[in-house]
Image (spheres, rainbow, N blue to C red):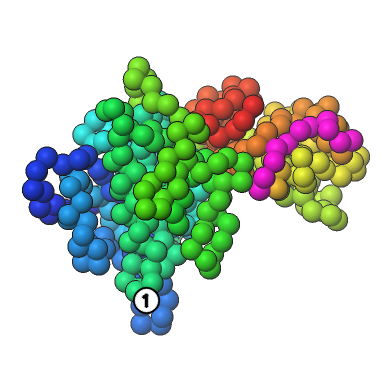
Amino acid sequence: MNLKKVSINTALPGKPRARILIIYTGGTFGMSYDKEGVLTPFSFEYILDQLPTLKNLALAITAVSFETPIDSSNINPEHWQLISSVIFDQYDQHDGFVVLHGTDTMAYTASALSFMLDGLNKPVIFTGAQLPISEPRSDARENLITALDIASAREQDDPIVPEVCIYFDYELLRGNRSKKVESMQFDAFDSGNYPPLAKAGVKIDYNFSVIRTPSRTTTLNLRATFETNIAILKLFPGINKNVVSAVLNTPGLKAVILETYGSGNAPTLSWLLEQLSAAIERGVIIVNISQCPGGRVVQGRYETSKGLQQIGVISGADMTTEAAVTKLMLLIGEYGSSNAKTMIGISLAGELTA
Ligand code: ASP
């Protein structure tokens, strides 16, 4: 997996407002139709042809691109390592970062990067599009131009948004609180458990009270080791004992996200509690995440979650599945299971409300 540098001739009349690095990974944003009418990723130079105004934003823009741009359904932790290492290496040379990424797994990548870039004090803004930039009605142009604006926005010398975010369809969301919720309309993302950090209209209205404050003292530290032996087990009425057993007894399994109902409830079937309890005894971390996009897990509120609490299932509070999966993979990879078990319930990058 390689990156290539793309030169953008920003004919700046004066001093640039900010130095921004764009990382182009692929996604519908830059796709075009092949001979069979199937959307496939295209190279970044093509985007420049479609959006010449990029050259006139009073920004010093540098761009790097995946050598072979990809549909984000093909993203894996190695791509997260690549994206985060570019940001880490280029951190001092830039004021902000814009990552162009397919929408399908954008919430996973944004969540992963929020945990990997420990001590981040600059904007890392993800965006993409529901329609390729070559389409007349495409949302790509607005999404990119406003993402660049947000990545370069400063107040009293500090970046306004020193966090990993998703900007899409006029809303700025915290990355590790976001979910893809729509595949046909333009409003592809939502963060049911956290207010938007900004809304873009004629002006960009920042909701300062919910944006993390930059710390002048922290330095950027990169965490990049992932443990991928984890599973998501989504409950449904009628779930089968053998299926649950097969998942929980997977050789090498380190952790399971148990996707429960409502505020963290599960059927009170004795075989289910026994199997979960046996897995916990074997050292598997089990985290309770609700299937509801809004609200939070409160184990013990109902009888149907009391048993989970008693056997040692960890409450995921109001984390999204995307945040919980990436956080678990990174914490186990970096610090080992027993540390991960205590750290999973602590907010590392604003992903949960304790
Ligand atoms: N399949 C595309 C991707 O995630 C969808 C998109 O970009 O909107 O790469």
x and y percentages locating residue 330 in the rendered image? 51, 34
Mark 1, ligand 1, within 8 Å: the answer is: no
- Seen from the viewer's position, the closer of residues 128 and 37 is 128
Left or right of 317 in this view: 349 = left
x and y percentages locating residue 182 in the rendered image? 56, 61
Left or right of 77 in this view: 3 = left
Check the picture and name the quadrant holding the C terminus: top right
Left or right of 339 in this view: 149 = left
x and y percentages locating residue 94 in the rendered image? 24, 36
Q: Amino acid at mark 1?
A: Tyr
x and y percentages locating residue 207 in the rendered image? 47, 38
Where 294 falls versus 276 (above or below)?
Answer: below
**Residue 298 in magenta stretch:** yes
Left or right of 64 in this view: 174 = right
User: Helix, strand, or loop for circle 1?
Assistant: strand
* The quarter of the picture showing ligand 1: bottom left
Q: Which residue lies at the image location 45% right of the left edge and 30% below the top edge? A: 212
- Seen from the viewer's position, the closer of residues 337 and 301 is 301
Q: Which residue lies at the image location 30% right of the left edge and 48% below the top edge? A: 148
**Residue 305 in magenta stretch:** no
Q: Which residue is mark 1?
A: 33
Span of residues in magenta: 293-303
